[in-house]
Amino acid sequence: MEDQVAGERVTLARIAETAGVSVSTVSKVLNGRQDVSAPTRQRIETLLETHGYRRGARSAAEAPLIEIVFHELDAIWAMELILGVEHIAKDHGGSVVLTQSGTRHSPGPDWIEGVMRRRPLGVILVFSALPEEFKHQLRSRSIPFVIIDPAGDPDPDVPSVGSANWSGGLAATRHLIECGHRRIGIITGPEDMMCSLARLDGYRSAMTTAGLTVDPSLVAFGDFHVEGGYSYAAEMLARPDRPTAIFAGSDLQAIGVLEAASALGLRTPEDLSVVGYDDVAVAQWSRPALTTVHQPLRKMAEAGAEMLLRLRAGEATTTRMELAISLVVRKSTAPPPGTL
C-alpha cells in the first residue's frame, strides 16, 4: 500500500529498510500484532509517524463499525452512551461493537491488537486519556478516534466531548443553599479524576459565594458507587453536628446516601436533603425520587459519533465540545428541619 507524502512515495518496504526490519514486521505493527519487541515496535511507529504514513481509502476488509471502548460495560450510565452512538451509526448504515478494556483512565494494551484487526470506521473511547502509543497507532492506520469524557479533561490534541462538571457542582449546591441549607456535605468521585475535582470546585464556589464555610470533615472523595456513598454518608451523619444536606457526585452514590440515612432513622427529605449527579434511570425510581444534575450522556454520545464520522470523512470539525448540564428537581430535597 502506498501514499503520497511531501512529493515522495512512502512504501512499507522503505519503512522496513529504514527501520532495519522485514516488511512482514512492519505489517505486524500496522495490524497491531503483539509478537514484535517493544523497541522495534516503537522504532517502526516513530517512522510511520515521521513519514506521515496513512492508509488510503477504506478497504473491503474494513467493517462499517463504530467501536466503543469502556473500562466497565456494566456501569449504569453505559447504556445511555451506547444508545447515542448506535443512533448515529444506524443513520449512516453502520453498526456498533462494544469492547471492555483497561482502567478508568485508558484502555489496556490488549485492546489495540483487536481494533487493528477489526478495522472499524472509528473508535469512541470512554476514558479520560489515551496513551501516545495508541494515538500513533490509530492515526497511522487512519482510524479516527474521539473520547466521550464524562470523567476528565483529555489532552488538547484528542477530539473529545464532555459536559460542564463545574457548573453541575455549582447548580447542585446552589439549589441546596436556596432551600435554606447551610451545613452541606459533598461526596464527590475519585480524587484522581478531573470531573470529581471540577464538581467539588463548583460546590466550593457556591458555598463561598453564599458566605458559607466549607467544613473539611464534610468533604469526601468516593468511588461513584453505592457502597462509597453509603460509607461516607454514614460517617458524616453519625456526627453530632451532622449536615442537613449532602451532594453526591453520582446517582449511585446518592442511593447509598439515602440508604445510610434510612439506616440511621433519618427521613429524606424531612431530615436530610440529597442531590445526585447524572440523572440515570434509577434516579427517578428511587424513593424518594432523586433531585439530580442531568448530564446529557446520550447527547454526548451522539455528538461524539457525529464528530467521529466527520473526522473519517476528512471534514473540518471542532475537536473539543462541552455540553450543558441542567438541574432536575424531584422529591429528595426540601428546606432543612425546623424551617418548614
Image (spheres, grey):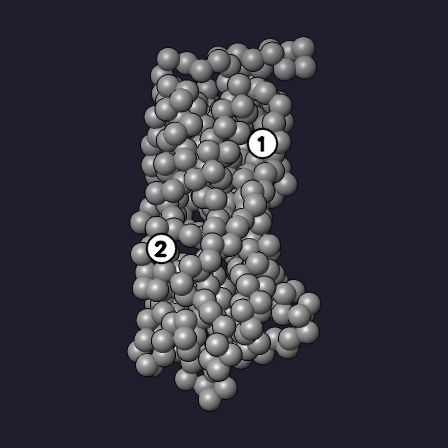
Q: Nearer the viewer, residue 230 or 36?
A: 230
- The residue that label 1 is drawn on is 46
Q: Hey, what amino acid is under mark 2? A: Gln
Residue 110, relative to residue 199: is it above or below?
above
Q: Residue at x 36, y 76 (%)?
A: 267
Residue at the farthest bottom position: 240
In front: 174, or 240?
Answer: 174
- Of the pair 321 and 168, the residue shown nearer to us: 168
Counting labels gives: 2
Comes first in the chain, label 2 or label 1: 1
Q: Residue at x 38, y 51 (%)?
A: 280
Give the residue drawn at x 55%, y 63%. Answer: 175
Residue 79 x %, y %: 34, 43
**Mark seen at residue 61:** none
Residue 110 location, x and y as percent? 37, 41
Q: Which residue is mark 2?
A: 284
Q: Give the residue type at disc 1.
A: Thr
Task: Give the crowd class for mark 2: few <14, some 14-19, many >=20 residues within 10 Å.
Answer: some
Residue 60: image quadrant is: top left
In the rendered image, is residue 331 in sight? yes
For discs 2 and 1, the disc positioned in front in the rendered view: 2
Q: Secondary structure at mark 2?
A: helix
Question: How far across and down, in percent of the image, does residue 103 sit?
Answer: 42, 51
